[in-house]
Amino acid sequence: MRLCRYDNDRLGVVIDDAVLDVTPVLDRLEACRYPLPRHDLLIANLAALRPHIEALARTAPRRPVAEVTLLSPVANPGKLVAAPVNYHRHLQEVLGDANLHHHNRINEIQRAGLFLKATGSLVGAGAGIRLNQPERRTDHEIELAVVIGREAREVPAARALDYVAGYTIGLDITIRGPEERSLRKSPDSYSVLGPWLVTPDEIAAPSGLAFDLQVNGEIRQRSNTSDLIIDVPGLIEFASRFYTLHPGDVIFTGTPEGVNPIQAGDRLRATIEGIGTMEVLVAAQRSAT
Ligand code: MN
């Protein structure tokens, strides 16, 4: 199943080029009061809601997917976990270019570990990227993103895929420079997820997915998740050793070689096999409020 959020917080099932509006299923979610749960309410209840979503989809009003504004498929993730330098060829690329490593210590991920991006940086494809510091080099990073579906704590890799709610395309937008990763990668709109969430029944194994990123029609990054240093089950094992993962938490699995600067006016087109394609526009810095 391909599940999207769009327009004014509507929920849709994507079939071919159409969005089927299944928003009424959200009425089945329990009402939440302060303090809010750490998980995303929809993702936590997705398995239970699925039969109702499928029933609604049979008669749902439909619209062309090209006509809707796509939001992040996860509304309220508790954490955006991210893997630094997790592709073999990207590691070589970074080690060879001072503009990329800025004399920060670049370690293999086994030693460097994971980092967190602010959840406030999350947007969907339709929002686009707003450059935070246009005078500084800001790069695109396409990544397979994994959405956690069940509470996970010290989960061994062999069972890790049982904890996945689905997969989506992630863009980990990054200001290059000497500061901590979490600062350089957390401005508003610097985490893009989309175009939708694809449940694991459609992606049996996340280990051999081809993907690419085009900027203004030119291929900038092209790789396959088979080149990951730590694969998806390994990342879930790694992350869940350090913190409990909750439904809706997202793991950005890392980007391959080919990172390059973006600028206002650019049109990014990201494709991952088995998920789909999303287009994201880059705009100049937003005006101060
Ligand atoms: Mn990244």
Image: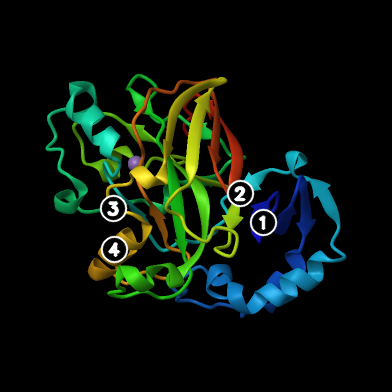
The mark tally for this picture is: 4
Q: Are marks 3 and 4 in contact (CB under 8 Å)?
A: no
Q: Which residue is mark 1?
A: 9
Q: Kindly state the secondary structure of the residue where label 4 is placed.
A: helix
Q: Residues within 10 Å of mark 1 (few under 14, many from 20)?
A: some
Q: Which residue is mark 3?
A: 230
Left or right: where 104 falls relative to 182: left
Whether residue 25 is visible:
yes
Q: Earlier in the sequence, mark 1 or mark 2?
A: 1
Residue type, label 3: Ile
Left or right: where 80 falls relative to 277: left
Q: Earlier in the sequence, mark 3 or mark 2?
A: 2
Q: CA distance from mark 1 to mark 2?
A: 8 Å
Residue 239 is labelled as: 4
Residue type, label 2: Leu
Residue type, label 1: Asp
Q: Kindly state the secondary structure of the residue where label 2 is placed.
A: strand
Q: Residues within 10 Å of mark 3 (few under 14, many from 20)?
A: many
Q: Earlier in the sequence, mark 1 or mark 4?
A: 1
Q: Please identify, in this view, whether the residue under mark 4 or under mark 2 is nearer the observer.
A: 4
Q: CA distance from mark 3 to mark 2?
A: 29 Å
Q: Are marks 1 and 2 in contact (CB under 8 Å)?
A: yes
In the image, residue 284 above or below residue 69: above
Q: CA distance from mark 4 to mark 2?
A: 26 Å
Residue type, label 4: Ala
Image quarter for ligand 1: top left
Q: Are marks 1 and 4 in contact (CB under 8 Å)?
A: no
Q: Which residue is mark 2?
A: 71
Q: Please identify, in this view, whether the residue under mark 3 or under mark 4 is nearer the observer.
A: 3
Q: CA distance from mark 1 to mark 4?
A: 30 Å
Left or right: where 54 falls relative to 62: left
At x 22% / y 31%, what residue is drawn? 92
